[in-house]
Image: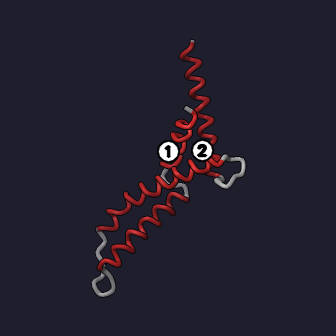
Amino acid sequence: MSSLISNNASAANVQILDAQAAQAKNGIDNPRLSANKRKAHEAAEQFEAVFLSQMLSPMFETVKTDSMMGGGNGEDVFRSMMVQQMGKAIAKKGGIGIADQVYREILKMQEE
């Protein structure tokens, strides 16, 4: 009986966390969200942006540069900045779902 109650309680907690994640995703500027939850969502989104940048980076390393108009240290720096911005843009638009999972875990850790 107690395992049934704990399963129902954990299912309810998951639903609450899912609702909070959806609320944060739909409106991070929502004044009803606490400052801590807003910061948690921003941290989760930044984590996803860094992850995506690291995953995109090898793809751009294989692209050959034009010797007449490109190449050199300047292009290497520009490419790394471009990949970082692409990661941020993808994460900002919803990403691949990593930020939502990280956000939920942050909220779980704060509740404990």
Numbered disc 1: secondary structure: helix
Q: Residues within 10 Å of mark 1 (few under 14, many from 20)?
A: some
Q: Quadrant of residue 62?
A: bottom left
**Lateral position of residue 67 relative to residue 86, left or right:** left
Q: Quadrant of the C terminus?
A: top right
Q: Which residue is mark 1?
A: 102
Q: Quadrant of the N terminus?
A: top right
Kindly identify the residue that appears in the image at 35 percent across and 63 percent down.
57
Kindly identify the residue that appears in the image at 52 percent across and 36 percent down.
109
Q: What amino acid type should be assigned to the residue bearing mark 1?
A: Val
Residue 29, percent across and down? 67, 55
Residue 47, percent across and down? 47, 52
Residue 61, percent across and down? 30, 67
Q: Which residue is mark 2?
A: 21
Q: Which mark is residue 84?
A: none
Q: Is residue 52 above or below residue 19?
A: below
Furthest-top residue in this view: 1
Q: Is residue 88 above or below residue 20?
A: below
Numbered disc 2: secondary structure: helix
Q: What amino acid type should be assigned to the residue bearing mark 2?
A: Ala
Residue 14, percent across and down? 57, 33
Query: Which colour assignment does the render follow?
Result: secondary structure
Kindly identify the residue that appears in the image at 69 percent across and 52 percent down.
30
Q: Gap in Å between the C-alphas at discs 1 and 2? A: 10 Å
Callout count: 2
**Lateral position of residue 94 relative to residue 61, left or right:** right
Q: Along the polypeptide, which appears first: circle 1 or circle 2?
A: 2
Q: Residues within 10 Å of mark 2 (few under 14, many from 20)?
A: many
Q: Quadrant of residue 67?
A: bottom left
